[in-house]
Amino acid sequence: MQNILKHLKSLEKIVSPLTAFFFGTILTCCAYGLLSSSLALRLADNSDNTFAAGIILAMYYTGYIVASVVSYRIINKVGHIRAFSTYISIFSGIVLLHFFSDNLYFWGVLRFLEGYCIGSAFMCLESWLNARATNANRGMIMSLYMISSYLGASSGQLLLNIPDSSGVVIYITVSILLSVALVPISLTALPTPAITVHKNMSLIALYKKTPVGVAGCLISGVFVGAFYILGAIYAHQMKLTLEQTSLFMFFGVFGGMAIQLPIGRLSDYFDRRIVMLFIGGFLFLIVPWVHFFITSGTGMLIIGALLMGFGTFILYPISVSHVNDMIADDERVEASGMLILLQSIGMIAGPIVISFFMQEFGPISFVGAYAVAAGVFIVFCLKHIMFKDINYISPSPTYPIPLDTTRIFHKISEDETLMDKARELISPTEKKL
């Protein structure tokens, strides 16, 4: 009992100062989760071309890619809070433009801009959070962050049932959620990373350090992109009602949220590559059966959605934690951008390819693609786990929360200052002068 209380007290120390951070994340993810599913359903109702709908919706993640390449410069220039506030404000305005036209090309442009804004915002949040974590607790910290993300995104799916005869209520709701999300993040007292600390890193260099982590981010993009972009369309093709579709999307994302903390904590004690291997194996074996579960009643629909969510949404945070175990603090912002880039590539390529096969062969292609992608990842993991060693580095100690208000001043008083070290280099003759 004492161990449980001790663990809960330790968890409280971590979570309490991050409450505003996580609350802002919940609202942001609720908004974009609602928007993504709403747009997918409207495209499915207004067009029989699943492939075209997949391309338009995938433009969202093209914006992600642009964000991952250029946004770190803005973040390092103005700071994490200002950058986050700017991107979310722009996103809030762009959402309302969907009401002015149903033109597919116009929607494609809007999806690109929305992807750029939300990708940049998440880059702020993830690099900020990873800078406050250590190798010992990064899995748990990232799990709490992902729980917040998926709690918001799953809640957004339930808002699909809002009466909207005019077609504008959903857009207004999304805009309100984004605007309110700015408040807790902007007012948080959590220290932000130093914006002057930055080190260039290439994607090739990152891959050499952690090939399994890089591959995990890419494959997770396929899974997550397919679920968010095509999940509602898949449910529509399976003849599910709007209420059943919202349940499928809700419990899929909810399953991803529920599994975050136990698997994230487990990855803090075991080789994260092994954990990622088992996630791939789970999807390979389970997801094809979901196709038969979801039409067998509400109970089986919920079970199938939960199982799919378990594997779909856990791979990315474990991959990110594994990568951050291997890099130094001054590499985190640009590395975060590259991880978002990799996931975005999977989010674009996966749904486009899968939507083509869904157009040609029907909804079974949706779950079949999961099995193929998971199988490829399993083979890749086995190759690198069996034949390649791993060398973790120890970044400068950082703390996710200010555990003691005087800790930093105590630490400074113990360390030698730059002037102290300089004096040690001065010769005895020079000291006399």
Image: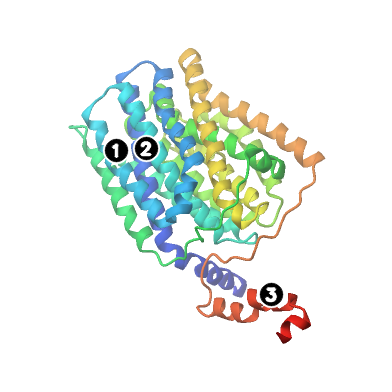
Q: Residue at x 54, y 54 (%)?
A: 142
Left or right, 76 with reference to 38: right
Q: Colour scheme of this structure image?
A: rainbow
Residue designated by label 3: 422
x and y percentages locating residue 422 in the rendered image: 69, 75
> In this view of the protein, can residue 292 be seen by the observer?
no
Left or right, 229 with reference to 289: left
3D distance between C-alphas at marks 1 and 3: 54 Å
Of 93 and 25, nearer the camera is 93
Label 1: how many Cα within 10 Å (few below 14, some 14–19, many 20+): some
Q: Residue at x 40, y 46 (%)?
A: 29
Question: Is the Cβ of the residue at disc 2 closer than 8 Å to that at disc 3?
Answer: no
In the image, farthest residue toward the top: 360
Quarter of the image holding residue 241?
Answer: top left
Question: Is the Cβ of the residue at disc 2 closer than 8 Å to that at disc 1?
Answer: yes
Q: Is residue 78 above or below residue 374?
A: below
Residue designated by label 1: 94
- The mark found on residue 114 in the picture is 2
Of 150 and 55, nearer the camera is 55
